[in-house]
Every structure is written in structure tokens, then in C-alpha cells.
Amino acid sequence: MKRSGMPHPDPTAFIQANLPISPVLAIPEILLHTAGPASGLWRLAGREEADPAPYWAYPWAGGAVLARHLLDRPEAVIGRRVLDLGAGSGLVAIAAAKAGAAAVTAIDVDANAIAAIGLNATVNGVSIVAVAANIIDEPPPEETDLLVVGDLFYDPELAVRVMAFLRRCQTAGIEVLIGDPHRAYLPQGALQRIATHAVSDFGAGSSGEAVQAGVFFLS
């Protein structure tokens, strides 16, 4: 629970003061504000049941593998309008911008993530439109050529909703790329693997070992 009487900190100021900037493992081209043991992240994220978990504060393998792929294969994004769904720290969005996308939008349900994306975009010298919204039950986004989705198949209910949204986007002519380290609810039968990279994963615990994560087309 949040402590009574404690003001909610300003997200931008808190992130700047408590989440140091460091390169992402296996993606040294990108720097991110990343939480550590002494960050006191709960003061920003909150402890109420309704508060979103601060997934944005750590690198996850699904985003990392997509970022690595886009930087290695810039032809996938050059000149295209890219939307990063569930953007978290903005890792994939930043990679898309660095790789030459014409425009990049990052969407996340957590307003704290939006603050982090703004800071991380500045650190990396790229321009990203960051929006706090939940769009997975809505029609496909307009003015989007490529939708990138990193690590959104960790919860069964969420996975079903995300997959339905991705199908609607595909029907509307939007290309979909998914990055995932084979989370429990990844619909592998509906995907075509196009790349594999060894990347770090906060979800793997504190071992620091790389995991083999995949990049997939929606079949």
C-alpha cells in the first residue's frame, strides 16, 4: 500500500534521479534509464493492486530481440511509420527510429512508461511520439505501416486480446512483427520465426545469462 500522506513523485524527476543510464546488454547502441536494487521504484509505481507493474523500468527479452533485429535489418523500418505496442521503456521504438523509420509512435498503458520513453528518446537522440493509452480493443491504428510487439504474451487473457488486435491490424494491411522469448502464452502456431538472437531478460531473474529469443511474423 502507498504510505499515507506521501506525495506521488513527478515521474520524470524521479526517473532522472533514481534510474541510472546504462547501455542495454547485447544492444550497446541504445542507452536506457534502468531500475536497480536501490532505485526505490515502488515510490513511483505504487503498491496498490490497481497500480500497473513497472515493467517499463527493466529490459525484457521480447523488446530486446526486436530492437536488435531492427538495428541489424534497418530495411524493415526505413521510411515506414512504426507503432510500438506496449512500449515500456521505448527500447523497440528507439531502435526503429535509429534504424531510419519515418515516424515512430510508442504506446503504453502506464503513464510512468511514457515519462521514461521521453527521457530515453532524448538520451538516444531520437524523436518519438509517446502516448498513454490502451488500444488493443479498438480498431487498427491509422497511419501505421508496421506494428511491433515485444513481450506481450505473458498473461493468458492479455494474450487472447492482443492476438485479436494483431489480426485486425493484419487485415487492415499493417505488417506485424513480434519479439518474444517463448513466454507461456505465445501463440507459436500462428507465427513464423524470421530471426533468433541471444539477449538479456529481466524475467529470467538475476543470473544475467542470455536467453534465445525470437522475432516472428504473424502468419
Image (cartoon, rainbow, N blue to C red):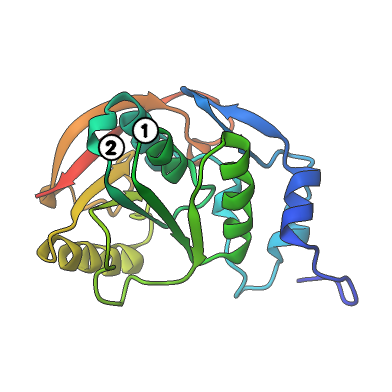
User: Horizontally, is 85 left or right of 111 in the view?
Assistant: left
Q: Which picture quadrant has residue 64?
A: top left
Question: Can you say whether 193 is above or below 127 in the image?
Answer: above
- Which residue is at a point 9% across and 50% down the rendered structure image? 219
Q: Quadrant of the N terminus?
A: bottom right
Residue 145 to residue 35: above or below: below
Q: Looking at the image, which residue is at 54% across and 25% down?
A: 208
Q: Nearer the viewer, residue 142 or 18?
A: 142
- Of labels 2 and 1, earlier in sequence is 2
Residue 192 is situated, as x and y percent measured from the top left of the image, at 12, 41
Which residue was labeled with disc 1?
99
Three-letter code, disc 2: Ile
Badge 2: how crowded within 10 Å, few (<14), some, or many (20+)? some
Task: Indicate the position of residue 116 as horizontal and vertical percent values.
Answer: 62, 51
Circle 1 SS class:
loop
Front-lying residue, 42 or 142:
142
Q: Residue furthest right?
A: 5
Quadrant in which residue 137 is drawn: bottom left
* Residue 212 visible here: no
Numbered label attached to residue 78: 2
Task: Tell me the amino acid under the disc marked 1.
Answer: Ala
Kindly indicate whether the residue at mark 1 contacts the one at mark 2 (C-beta within 8 angstroms): yes
